[in-house]
Image: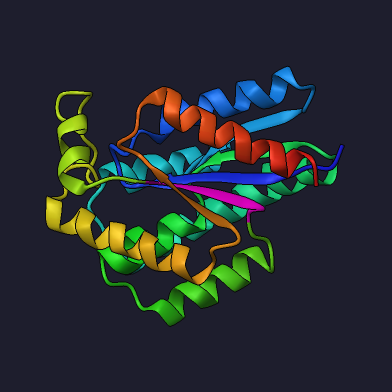
């Protein structure tokens, strides 16, 4: 079986986490070897960098470089080896998050992000990305009281509106890869959409 790289994206509170787990279970039930992972994170070093990114105050430039440092270690140690042995990699966030959060949300230079992306990843991109799209106000209501907020989750609605627009632009630029999912739909409605699309990837 050929490995595939599948990512899940969306603003905090979009509801993607439930469907990441369901999609992994769906694939495993059909006999696929699946690596479940996340970004920032996925390795011991990248998880340590994740803690800094989520809880320490830093400049945008430092934030951007830490994101890509974590990604490089993740790629080298887990993602690339898994794909090479035919394993499916299902990742909660990848570089589209960087474009949306650090780029559209915080205003990082697009040329700098593009250069780092090329340097760190080479030509590697997900085979499919599921973008869970919701209104920032709905996402904010979902986040309230769920757990102690990290420094990204504490951002206001205006920030998440910019992040959402960043995702919209990414999806418009790469419609063959990025599938928009209405994150306001029921769990069952979203599950049916995801499983139907995953089945098409499995058949190719």
Visible in this render: residue 47?
yes
Q: In the orientation shown, which residue stands out farthest toward the top?
A: 29
The mark total stands at 0
Q: Which is nearer the eye, 136 or 89?
A: 136
Say which residue appears at 87% left-offset and 36% top-offset: 1
Q: In the orientation shown, which residue stands out farthest toward the bottom?
A: 111
Q: Position of residue 155 (x, y in %)?
A: 16, 49
Residue 127 forms part of the magenta stretch:
yes
Q: Which is nearer the eye, 17 or 85?
A: 17
Say which residue appears at 76% left-offset and 39% top-offset: 202
Q: Position of residue 17 (x, y in %)?
A: 42, 30
Say which residue appears at 79% left-offset and 41% top-offset: 203
Q: Is residue 32 left or right of residue 23?
A: right
Residue 105 forms part of the magenta stretch:
no
Residue 67: quarter of image? bottom left
Q: Which is nearer the eye, 160 or 108?
A: 160
Say which residue appears at 26% left-offset and 47% top-offset: 56
Q: Position of residue 8 (x, y in %)?
A: 49, 43
Q: What's the magenta bit mostly, secondary-structure-wise?
A: strand
Q: Is residue 151 left or right of residue 157?
A: right
When the figure is inspected, residue 143 is found, relative to residue 169, above or below; the finding is above
- Magenta stretch: give its range: 126-132
Visible in this render: residue 62?
no
Q: Position of residue 187 (x, y in %)?
A: 40, 24
């Amino acid at each position: 079986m050929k490995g595939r790289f599948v990512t899940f994206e969306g603003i905090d509170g979009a509801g993607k986490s439930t469907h990441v787990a369901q999609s992994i279970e769906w694939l495993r039930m059909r006999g696929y070897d699946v690596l479940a992972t996340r970004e920032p994170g996925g390795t011991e070093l990248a998880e340590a960098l994740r803690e800094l990114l989520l809880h320490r105050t830093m400049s945008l430039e430092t934030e951007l470089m830490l994101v890509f440092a974590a990604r490089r270690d993740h790629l080298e140690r887990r993602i690339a080896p898994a794909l090479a042995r035919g394993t499916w990699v299902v990742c909660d966030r990848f570089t589209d998050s960087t474009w949306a959060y650090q780029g559209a949300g915080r205003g990082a230079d697009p040329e700098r992000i593009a250069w780092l992306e090329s340097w760190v990843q080479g030509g590697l991109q997900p085979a499919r990305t599921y973008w869970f799209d919701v209104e920032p106000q709905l996402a904010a209501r979902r986040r309230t009281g769920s757990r102690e907020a990290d420094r990204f989750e504490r951002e206001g609605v205006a920030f998440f509106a910019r992040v959402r627009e960043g995702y919209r632009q990414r999806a418009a630029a790469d419609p063959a890869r990025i599938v928009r999912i209405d994150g306001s739909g029921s769990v069952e409605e979203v599950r049916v959409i995801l499983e139907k699309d995953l089945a098409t990837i499995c058949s190719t």
